[in-house]
Image (cartoon, rainbow, N blue to C red):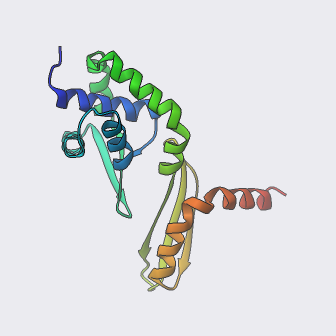
Amino acid sequence: MVTDSSTIYKLMILYMLNRLDSQLTNSQLSSFFITKDYTDYFNIQQTLSDLVASKFVEKVTIRNTSYYSITPEGYESLTFFKNQIPKGALEDINTYLEENKYALKNEVGTQADYYRHTNGDYIAHCQVMEGRSLLYEINISVPSEEEASRICSNWRGYSEELYAIIMKSLLQ
């Protein structure tokens, strides 16, 4: 029986990432553990760091936001040790994910970043993911970093509307 709380937190994170079949942000994961009074912010950061170092979780950072997803090694470990997660914790996770799944997926499903192109312009790279599949993406070339940053900042709020306009226009 696993008695180390750090190990249980690792298994809980792996379970959350696997159950949602989507990336979760550092903020989303931390929020669950803190609001449910499992542990504090610093323990979660250490736990996430350990999972990334052991290659059970992959971390991608886009515009100061860290996104986490389970790796095949993490999934394999979870299948062996899932029964070590306390039943109450599994219920808390399942309830949390069920109540918040659309908000969680929407938050991580719309991602945007920008980079400087070799011609001096900036490219705003915006995408919408559904689970682990790319729904659509768009790259927009703009002359300034300020414009690229503004596009990325506004992407989440307009991505659904733009998708509807694009689909309507292309399918007429």
In depth, the one of 76 and 97 nearer the eye is: 97
Classify the position of the N terminus by image quarter.
top left
Q: Residue at x 48, y 84 (%)?
A: 144
Is 90 situated above or below 112?
A: above
Marker count (numbered) = 0
User: In the visual, does 141 lie left or right of 65?
Assistant: right
Q: Residue at x 53, y 63 (%)?
A: 126
Q: Residue at x 54, y 58 (%)?
A: 127
User: In the visual, does 51 lie left or right of 67?
Assistant: left
Q: Quadrant of residue 64?
A: bottom left
Q: Position of residue 4 (x, y in %)?
A: 14, 25
Q: Position of residue 118 (x, y in %)?
A: 42, 81
Outermost residue toward the right?
172
In depth, the one of 75 and 42 nearer the eye is: 42
Residue 133 seen in the current view = no
Q: Quadrant of residue 145?
A: bottom left
In depth, the one of 107 and 142 nearer the eye is: 107
Q: Residue at x 36, y 43 (%)?
A: 31
Q: Position of residue 7 (x, y in %)?
A: 19, 28
